[in-house]
Amino acid sequence: DTEVTQTPKHLVMGMTNKKSLKCEQHMGHRAMYWYKQKAKKPPELMFVYSYEKLSINESVPSRFSPECPNSSLLNLHLHALQPEDSALYLCASSFVETSGRIDTQYFGPGTRLTVL
Amino acid sequence: LAKTTQPISMDSYEGQEVNITCSHNNIATNDYITWYQQFPSQGPRFIIQGYKTKVTNEVASLFIPADRKSSTLSLPRVSLSDTAVYYCLVNTDKLIFGTGTRLQVFP
């Protein structure tokens, strides 16, 4: 299995809603990532989990809350979002070498989020 | 902080070879260079990865000069289905994608 899956595919939410994005992989990868991608822009790193521990938080607002329940799952909890948070949210996973070097990332199809 | 730049767009015709260059002046000693392809509303798809000189797989080649401050993705004999955005990524801990190159292939 060389696939990263993400649910839902599309999500529309109001600014007062609470929702969650889910990501799953079964490749034995021990690093998982959340990226945000606006239209016609490259993906921007939000969070990195390595061995189920948050290792990188790129100064993301607290209305985005990541969670890594186990080595195969990654969630992104959303609360009180703003319209400018509308974007494609991408999950990725990779092996982590013993040196700490990040190996090739494999991306999911993304969740298209619209905040009204 | 690595700054990774690419041409905004390129046009080609079916059957031609396409070379897309990425500039990464601040690449660190241990950094690898990875190239991805992305179609609209899909996640990036891995194409190729390298550290130095030349790497080739079944879909592309990657050329990296000795100073490693740039890299060139070579797509042989492109087809219409290669129309996409291509990103280079320097595998630092900041995982900063290049600006992306929109490739349009014409019949």
Image (cartoon, coloured by chain):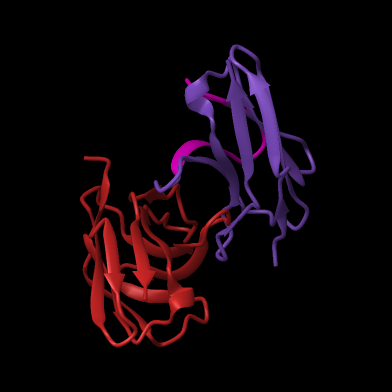
Chain colours: A red, B purple
**Residue A76 relative to residue B41: left or right:** left
Q: Where is residue A35 in the image (x, y as percent from the top left)?
A: 44, 63
Q: Where is residue B22 in the image (x, y as percent from the top left)?
A: 71, 43
Out of A13 and B63, give the one closest to the viewer.
A13
Give above or below for B58 relative to B44. Answer: above
Residue at 47% in and 25% down: B81
Out of B28 and A58, give the one closest to the viewer.
A58
Q: Which residue lies furthest to the top in this view?
A: B15
Span colored in magenta:
B45-60
Secondary structure mostly seen in magenta is strand
Residue at 42% in and 50% down: A105
Give above or below for B90 relative to A52. Answer: above
The reply to whether residue A56 is in sight is no
Q: Position of residue B85 (x, y in %)?
A: 56, 41
Q: Which quadrant holds residue B11?
A: top right
Residue B85 is inside the magenta segment: no
Q: In which quarter of the image is the C terminus of chain A?
A: bottom left
Q: In which quarter of the image is the N terminus of chain A?
A: top left
Q: Position of residue B83 (x, y in %)?
A: 54, 30
Residue at 39% in and 46% down: B42
The reply to whether residue A14 is in sight is yes
